[in-house]
Amino acid sequence: MTDGLRGAYARANDAWYAPLVKGGLGFAVLAALPFLLDYSFLGLSLGAFLSVNILIVTVVYATAGQAWNIISGYTGYFSFGHAAYFGAGAYTTSYLSVEFAINPWLGLLVGGLVAAAIGLVVGYLNFRYNLRGHYFALATFAVALLLQSAVQNISELGGAVGIYRPFPRDYGAEFGLAAMQFEETLPYYFVILAFLLVVTVAAWLIKHSQIGLYLFAIRENEDAAASLGISPFANKMFAMGVSAFFTAWAGAFWSMYLTLVRPSTVFGISQNVEILLPAIVGGTGSVVGVILGAFLVFPLSEFFRISFPDTPGLNTIVYGLALVLVAVLLPNGVISLKKYVFWWRDDAERGSADDDEPPAQE
């Protein structure tokens, strides 16, 4: 019977519509999660571990992690400074809404373009001078710290205090979807889930395109890829721009969800870690792994932070333990466990973190 099921799934998995079906089912489950919090099963309730707020935080970082994966997971260039783009999206959206009464939806697009411009500058300086490995990571980290320091000293951006979220009436709107602000928490979840859907579709399309083939070739052996006529510089610049653009979307949403946007929260070290954590835990290069990693780490860390309020930094300890355990036990991320589940067969998926060893990086 197991062999029959395995064969039936293998045939269905090879169909052209298989990714659409699996993706649709996955996002349907995510959309249903808030409504399942009050239900109990075998005496256990999801509401005891999760809340709508925790779900929102999880999906925010799943969105940012999916964007980070486009450059770092696909090319192997480990960025430790994506908080720069997250913060650029948050500050651009807030500043335009407060100072010029521009709707956050337009601010989101402008913030994405600003972040993409910053990403292209960062990418040009790094790729032009061929920085790789830990040099690239340190260079990107320095950019995030530089932006944090600059914003803290610009009084027009609120300095170290930051920018308070405006009321919808300040930019000619009412609470609701058009204002990207709601009087209840639940609608925020569906907005950021829609963001995650868009970024996931974009990441999947890139991964399974010719550009994706080039990016993974660069990750495996950049010199060999160049010898075949692939332009590492152009393809890495494309990945960096797209990655920065979509990371800014998560920051723009963050600015409309929280009351206050501060340099230390959107540009800080912890923000850099939280953005890359879903992909590292789930599996770099894997589209599904990023979402899985986010839902493994953030609900657990938020649960500990809320349950033990007298122990500050406990969520950071959870992050550290997650990274250590994954690095030691599952260097390709938890998505590598799918090889043991017959109904999740996707061995031919490019860059899916199924290999016995992680891809070599210089």
Image (spheres, rainbow, N blue to C red):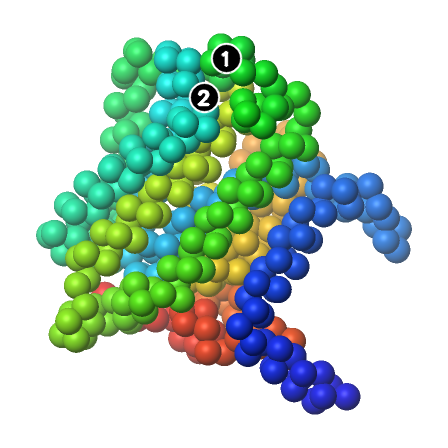
Residue 334 vs residue 304: left or right? Answer: left
Front residue of 4 and 53:
4
Q: Is residue 12 above or below residue 244?
A: below
Picture coordinates of residue 38, whole percent (x, y): 82, 41
Secondary structure beneath dot 1 equals loop
Vertical relation: 92 (above or below) 192: above
Of the pair 108 and 284, the residue shown nearer to us: 108
Q: Residue furthest left?
A: 129
Are there few (<14), some (14-19), or many (20+) residues within 10 Å of tag 1? few
User: Sequence-wise, which precedes: disc 1 or disc 2?
Assistant: 2
Q: Quadrant of residue 133?
A: bottom left
Q: Which quadrant, please, contains the N terminus?
A: bottom right
**x, y (%) of residue 82?**
35, 42
For badge 2, the amino acid type reads Asn
**Quadrant of the image for the C terminus?**
bottom left
Kindly check if marks 1 and 2 are in contact, taking CB atoms under 8 A apart as contact.
Answer: yes
Image x and y of residue 306, in percent = 66, 34
Q: Which residue, given by chain and number where applicable, does mark 2 sit on?
A: 103
The residue lying at 65 percent from left, 32 percent from top is: 187
Q: Residues within 10 Å of mark 2 (few under 14, many from 20)?
A: many
Instruction: Name the quadrant containing residue 145.
Output: top left
Q: Which mark, residue 183?
A: none
Q: Residue at x 61, y 73 (%)?
A: 344
Please tell me which residue is depicted at 62% across the width and 38% down the height of the picture. 190
Q: Secondary structure at mark 2?
A: loop
Question: Which amino acid type corresponds to the residue marked 1 in the rendered image?
Answer: Gly
Which residue is labeled 1 in the image?
172
Q: Is 94 left, or right, of 242 in this rendering?
A: right
> How many numbered discs, if any?
2
Give above or below for 185 relative to 225.
above
Q: Measure the alpha-carbon separation of dots 1 and 2.
A: 8 Å
